[in-house]
Image (cartoon, rainbow, N blue to C red):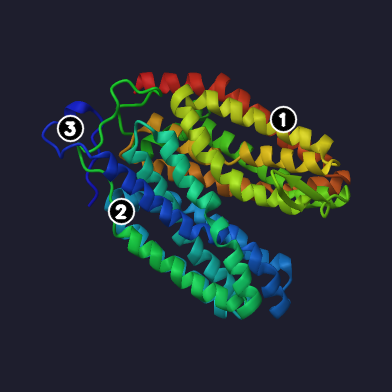
Amino acid sequence: MEARVATSTSEAIGSRATASEATRWGQLIFGIICMVMIANLQYGWTLFVTPIDQKYHWGRAAIQVAFTIFVLTETWLVPIEGYLIDKFGPRVMICGSGFLVGIAWMINAYADSLALLYLAAAIGGIGAGVVYGGSVGNALKWFPDRRGLAAGLTAAGFGAGSALTVVPIANMIASSGYEAAFWWFGIAQGIVVMLVALLLRAPEAGEVVAPAAPAVQQTRRDYSPSEVLAPLATRDFYKSPFFIMYLMFVMVGAGGLMAIAQLAPIANDYKIAGVPVSILGLTLPALTFALTIDRVLNGVCRPFFGWVSDHIGRENTMFIAFFLEGIGIYALLYFASNPFLFVILSGLVFFAWGEIYSLFPATCTDIYGRKFATTNYGMLYTAKGTASLLVPLANVLTSATGSWHAVFYVAAILNIIAAVMALAVLRPMRLRAMAQG
């Protein structure tokens, strides 16, 4: 069973010796490897949609329901999974989830009905949720002194991990069929997760001591999940830092996703999708270039902004990133007719969006402590699922107005409001909560 994490230097006396940097970074790397292995479940899915439809003619909309099921099970079950990880440790939970990850894609290889496809999506979502929550939670516990960077590097494994396998998967689909790609990559990814998970463990009492004078203020008390949620049951729920973070997470997550989903329609409307763009010696069609940048910058931004937040504070970094996102979305609307600016500004949007997966887990653990870090962030992480449910509203808004311009206005406004909330609402509320604790 996972030992209780010490929350002060005095608790560490008589406990296990402080862990070496090699031990801490080793645990971080193991978590990142696990995250890379589950990245294809989300980011590689798009490669399979067309081949499945060509074989069974179920329709893209029906097939994409599987993706929605995956996102919902991958996010909304994390609080329960996080509780089990905090209780039993990451090793047994993530190892078991590696089995689920492998089984999910193996089922996809033989799924001859939508019911089986949806079942596989649910199984894969459960497995991926455990791996994601467990890996991020472990990073938060091992690195109280560099919490933003550690969470960012771990989240980057999920955001950019599929970049290494996009071409091999596409080649296997073309040469052997999508069934073979599902089967062999499913087995490989599942086995790697199971083997690496055997090396994972949470820090024992005294191994990790909170820094005496951290650049970012941290609580010395560990809040249980019930304590975190207690204010939400009162009339003053809007005074809870958790509620404010959840609201901001949804606003930034949904705003970015709504804008990103419109990239292809914009490129096609302006007739620039196939126009070649050259940057740093690389030439690609504008839309392909923009989507390729997504893979890279969506991963790079997570450790970058996490590292920045370790030095200048979480809310200050949120303000910079969210405001940059809002401006980028607004600028993309007006300069999208220029293929070069379309690629550059879409890259800016991607770069300023993915940091929510490093800033929010770090902030949540700063406020509520390390002992239940996996569970508490798991509850906050459900905001990703909530945000995904709002994305279809972009299509409704586009249909109602006859243009995607309104979607960009809404997305930009949501990000700018969240940026202001970081400084004007979240920071004073966090300081009050930590002072009371």
Q: Mark 1 points at which residue?
A: 327
The picture places residue 1, in percent across and down from the top left corner, at 22, 52
Q: Residue at x 57, y 38 (%)?
A: 249
Instruction: Give percent across and percent down for residue 170.
Output: 63, 68
Amino acid type, callout 1: Ile
Q: Is residue 53 visible?
A: yes
Which residue was labeled with disc 3? Answer: 12
From mark 1 to mark 2, how far is it between C-alphas?
41 Å
In the orientation shown, which residue stands out farthest toward the left? Answer: 14
Circles 3 and 2 in contact, beta carbons < 8 Å = no
Q: Is residue 112 above or below residue 240?
A: below
Kind of residue indicated by mark 3: Ala
Determine which residue is flagged by label 2. Answer: 200
Residue ranking furthest to the front = 281
Q: How far apart are marks 3 and 2 (CA)?
A: 21 Å
Q: Residues within 10 Å of mark 3 (few under 14, many from 20)?
A: some
Residue at point 51%, 76% (across, down): 183
Position of residue 335 measured from the top left corner of the image (x, y, whole percent): 83, 36
Do the numbered discs 1 and 2 sit on residues whose CB atoms are within 8 Å? no
Task: Name which residue lies at 62% across and 31% down.
Answer: 322
Q: Is residue 318 above or below residue 406?
A: above
Amino acid type of the residue that numbered disc 2 sits on in the rendered structure? Leu
Quadrant in the rendering for residue 102: bottom left
User: Nearer the N terminus, badge 3 or badge 2?
Assistant: 3
Tag count: 3
